[in-house]
Image (cartoon, rainbow, N blue to C red):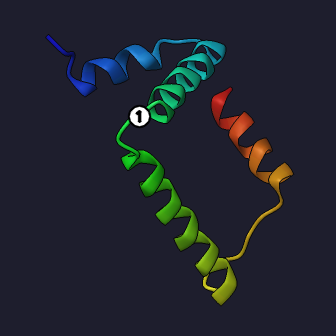
Amino acid sequence: MAKAISEIRAEIQELEPLQKRELLGLLVAELEDSENGEVDEVWLLEAQRRFQELKDGSVQGIPASQMFAKLERRIG
């Protein structure tokens, strides 16, 4: 029987940062292996939406170095 998302979330919170990164990599690889292409379609639509927001000026990009620094602080 599959675990509830709340149980999985609680277990993830107990992981060390490197374990979380490994888990994320496994999840992304699992999604990328999707045979139905649905995930690819969703990501393509999201990328197009974000690009359009940058083009029309409704959002402003930030340098990758700032984004990665912020992520690093959050992960720990």
Q: Picture coordinates of residue 73 (x, y %)?
A: 72, 36
Please tell me in which quadrant of the rendered image residue 17 appears. top right
Q: Which residue is drawn at 47% across and 12% down?
A: 14
Q: Residue at x 47, y 49 (%)?
A: 40
Q: Quadrant of the C terminus?
A: top right
Answer above or below: position of 6 versus 46.
above
Determine the residue located farthest toward the bottom in the rendered image: 56
- Residue 64 in the figure: left or right of residue 46: right
Give the labeled residue for mark 1.
34
Helix, strand or loop for disc 1: loop
Q: Picture coordinates of residue 23 (x, y %)?
A: 53, 18
- Residue 3 in the figure: left or right of residue 40: left
Depth check: give the residue in front, 3 or 10: 3
Determine the residue located farthest toward the left in the rendered image: 1
Please tell me in which quadrant of the rendered image residue 22 appears. top right
- Give, as a three-letter code, the residue at label 1: Ser
Depth check: give the residue in front, 44 or 8: 44
Q: In which quarter of the image is the N terminus?
A: top left
Structural crowding at the residue carrying mark 1, measured as other residues with C-alpha within 10 Å and reported as few (<14), some (14–19) or many (≥20): few
- Residue 40 in the figure: left or right of residue 60: left
Q: Picture coordinates of residue 27 (x, y %)?
A: 48, 26
Q: Residue at x 86, y 50 (%)?
A: 65
Q: Picture coordinates of residue 42 (x, y %)?
A: 42, 56
Q: How many labels does the image show?
A: 1
- Residue 1 in the figure: left or right of residue 41: left
